[in-house]
Image (cartoon, rainbow, N blue to C red):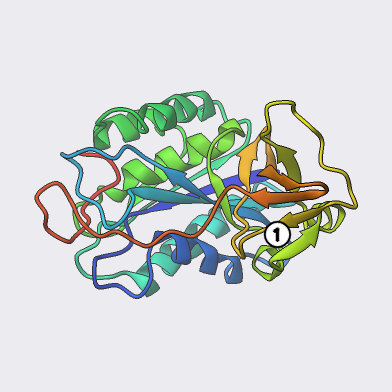
Amino acid sequence: MRIYLGFDDTDTIDADHGTGKLARWFQNQIPDSCQISGVLRQQLLVHESIPYTSHNSAACVVIDAPEACFLKIIIDRAAQHVAQYYLKGSDPGICAAIDGDSAMGDLMNFGRECTRKLLTQKDALDAARQVHLSGHGGTNDGIIGAAAAVGLTATGWHGRFIELGRLRKIPDIISVKDLESFGVKVVSLDRDASVPKPEEMVITNNWVRPRLLGQEPVLMVVERGKGIWENIGEKRQKRNHNAAGVLDKKQACLS
């Protein structure tokens, strides 16, 4: 069975770690019989009314567990994890749901809505009324992004992987075949829809963060020469600001 575990609003402007890192670190907390299938970053609405640290994102850890009883264990450990890394001034929240849960449709709709308009804690609680959703400090506004992260990830069509097996060990230049051995599919964005061949090479720019497309991690590339492709993504500098010009973060979507 698959468990989606969402985290949000667990950082502040002067923090040495944020929501993404906290979600990635959680892989050290899962039970031995469970497995992390990936950690995804989800982009939420960027709006002048919403304070945020850099890009207003949330994160979702995808966990494969042998039985439903592991859900409570994972929720308890997630709460302890947030308590351990809680930063004063942040407003963390967590959401946990099992794939196929009757509430998942509402969470998916909520997640999509959270990328395009302002939503409230009440909206999040309504969408997640049949699954776990809890705040763990400050205003608890993190429940908004945590619920959205679960819903968006569960659709199978949103977000980018920030953790996936040996993702961070992939070299700057690698063959399509070897990239696929890391669990990453390679898809061309050229106008003729050419298909990269297994022996052809990909320039990764030392930053492989596949998109979640059709429930699979996909690296989108463009052709740079005969048998040579290049990753369209690259690392960007962190921007720290909010609508008032004040450097802080208070929520994933306005409450």
Residue 132 visible somewhere in the drawing: no
Residue 96 image position (x, y, % from top left):
50, 46
Above or below residue 165? Residue 64 is above
Q: Residue at x 75, y 28 (%)?
A: 193
Displayed quadrant of residue 255: top left
Q: Residue at x 68, y 33 (%)?
A: 190
- 66 relative position to 79: left or right: right
Q: Residue furthest front?
A: 225
**Mark 1 neighbour class, 10 Å CA radius: few under 14, some 14 to 19, many 20 or more:** some
Residue 39 visible somewhere in the drawing: yes
Above or below residue 13? Residue 115 is above
Q: Residue at x 40, y 46 (%)?
A: 146
Residue 54 image position (x, y, % from top left):
31, 56
Above or below residue 105? Residue 161 is below
Q: Residue furthest left?
A: 244
Which of 101/141 is in front?
A: 141
Kind of residue at badge 1: Cys
Q: Residue at x 30, y 58 (%)?
A: 136
- 115 relative position to 180: left or right: left
Q: Which quadrant of the figure contains the N terminus?
A: top right
The residue to which callout 1 is attached is 34
